[in-house]
Image (cartoon, grey):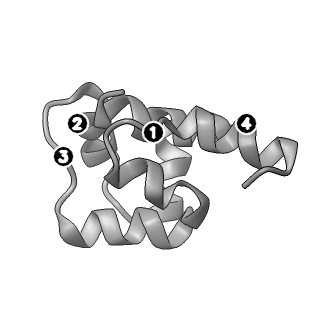
Amino acid sequence: MKFSEKIKNIRLLQKMTQEEFSCFLGIGYASVQKYESGVRKPGYKALRIICKRFPKYALALVIDDISTKQIYIKQKEGKA
């Protein structure tokens, strides 16, 4: 799963708009749009903020072969 898809999945799983997501993270709205479209990836500071706000998805963000949906489903089933 591409990094841009993972960011978008996190936002959608939290039932947030791009604007709400950016405000919650304290990151610019345009940055969130660029992350989700794959135009750019977040730098260390932004990635750290995302991982801090959504710790259950931190592993999925940094490991290529794990998707955020897999993490979410396992947590719902009580396996993670």
Residue at x 27%, y 39% (from the top left corner): 35
Q: Amino acid at mark 1?
A: Ile
The residue beneath circle 4 is: 73
- Say which residue label 1 marks: 66
Q: Say the numbered circle drawn on residue 34.
A: 2
Relative to 46, does residue 57 appear above or below in the rendering? above
SS label for mark 3? loop
Do the numbered discs 3 and 2 sit on residues whose CB atoms are within 8 Å?
Answer: no
Instruction: Give above or below for 54 relative to 60.
Output: below
Judged by depth in the image, the label closer to the viewer, 4 or 2, is: 4
Q: Nearer the viewer, mark 4 or mark 3?
A: 4
Answer with mark 4 or mark 3, whichever residue precedes in sequence: 3
> Dot 4, how many residues are within 10 Å of its Cα: few (below 14), some (14-19), or many (20+)?
few
What percent of the width, then of the height, locates residue 55? Answer: 56, 66
Q: How many marks?
A: 4
Q: CA distance from mark 4 to mark 3?
A: 25 Å
Mark number for residue 41?
Answer: 3
Question: Can you give x and y, in whole percent of width and height, for residue 3 in the image?
Answer: 30, 37
Q: Nearer the viewer, mark 1 or mark 2?
A: 1
- Quadrant in which the C terminus appears: bottom right
Asked if residue 74 lies left or right of residue 57, the reply is: right
**What residue appears at the point 25 percent right and 47 percent down from the top-left corner?**
31
Q: Residue at x 56, y 62 (%)?
A: 54
